Every structure is written in structure tokens, then in C-alpha cells.
Image (tube, rainbow, N blue to C red):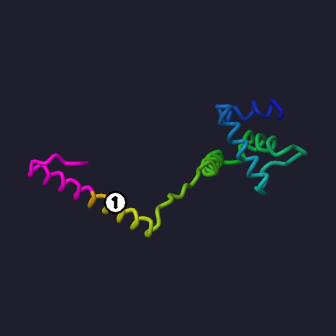
Amino acid sequence: MARVTVEDCIERVTNRFELVLLAGQRSRNISAGGELTVDRDNDKNPVVALREIADQTVELEELRDSLVKGLQKVAEIDEPEEDELMEYMVAAMGSDDETRNRDTAISESADAGVSPKV
């Protein structure tokens, strides 16, 4: 990568880290079949991408958008099946009935003056 190319790009993209991200994204676009806006001159894709940025032949905002889109991930939420949900609800209701029965037995034992066995 020619130093002159990077120095020309710094006039357009002042942050070197952002320049690396944008040039990398443009290089990937070229590798995927994107049209070149400058002559290749036997240069590799990263150098061509830097030359395009320096010559202002590519839109930086479009590169930023495609970079962000490429880094975003879509996560699917794994929701329980309806049958599993019903089983869970029945199990939860069953445990509530058992708790109520135990509480009732303790209450009745206390009313009778008997020490409850838990």
C-alpha cells in the first residue's frame, strides 16, 4: 500500500481507523464483484479501494451504511412451543394446589391445637 495513497485519503477521512474500516469494506465490495471507479493498474483490491476514496469516486456514506449493515446480526428469539407452555402451566398450577392443601392442613392443625407435621 503506497504511503501517498493513505496520505491522500486522510484529507477526505481524517480518522485513520475509520479509513481502514471504509477501505476494507470497499475492498470486500470489489471482491464481491462491485464495479471499479478507477483503473486497476495491477493494484490489489485494498489499494484500489484507497485510490477510490482519495479520488472521491465512491460515496463514503454508502460505504458506512454497508459496513454497519454487514456488522449487524439478527438474533431469532427461541419461544417455547405451545405444548411446552401448557405443560409448564399445568405443572405450575399443580404445585399451587399442593401448596394450598399444605397451608390448609397447617391452618386446620393450628385451629385444633395440634402441632403440624411438615
Q: Is residue 111 above or below residue 10?
A: below
At mark 1, the secondary structure is: helix
Q: Residue at x 79, y 34 (%)?
A: 5
Q: How many marks?
A: 1
Magenta residues, start to end: 99-118
In the rendered structure, the answer to whether residue 58 lies left or right of residue 79 reads: right
Question: Residue 54 at what x, y percent from top left?
Answer: 74, 39
Tell which of 55 and 81 is nearer to you. 81
Is residue 21 toward the left or the right of residue 41 in the image? left
Q: Is residue 113 magenta?
A: yes
Q: Which residue is mark 1?
A: 92
The image shows residue 34 at horizontal and vertical percentages of: 76, 55
Name the one closer to the observer, 32 or 61. Answer: 32
Image coordinates for residue 40, horizontal then vertical, percent: 86, 47
Residue extending furthest toward the front: 114
What's the residue type where badge 1 is placed? Ala
The image quarter containing residue 74 is bottom right
Compared with 95, 118 (above or below) is above
- Position of residue 112 in the picture relative to residue 42 (left or right): left
Closer to the camera, 21 or 112? Answer: 112
Q: Is residue 64 magenta?
A: no
Question: Magenta span: helix, strand or loop, mainly?
Answer: helix
Q: Position of residue 116 (x, y in %)?
A: 19, 48
Residue at the far bottom in the pictured view: 83
Image quadrant in which you'd find residue 20: top right
Q: Quadrant of residue 55?
A: top right
* Quarter of the figure with the N terminus: top right
For the point 72% across and 42% down, which residue is it? 23
Q: Is residue 86 above or below residue 50?
A: below
Task: Categorize mark 1 by other alpha carbons within 10 Å: few (<14), some (14-19), many (20+).
Answer: few
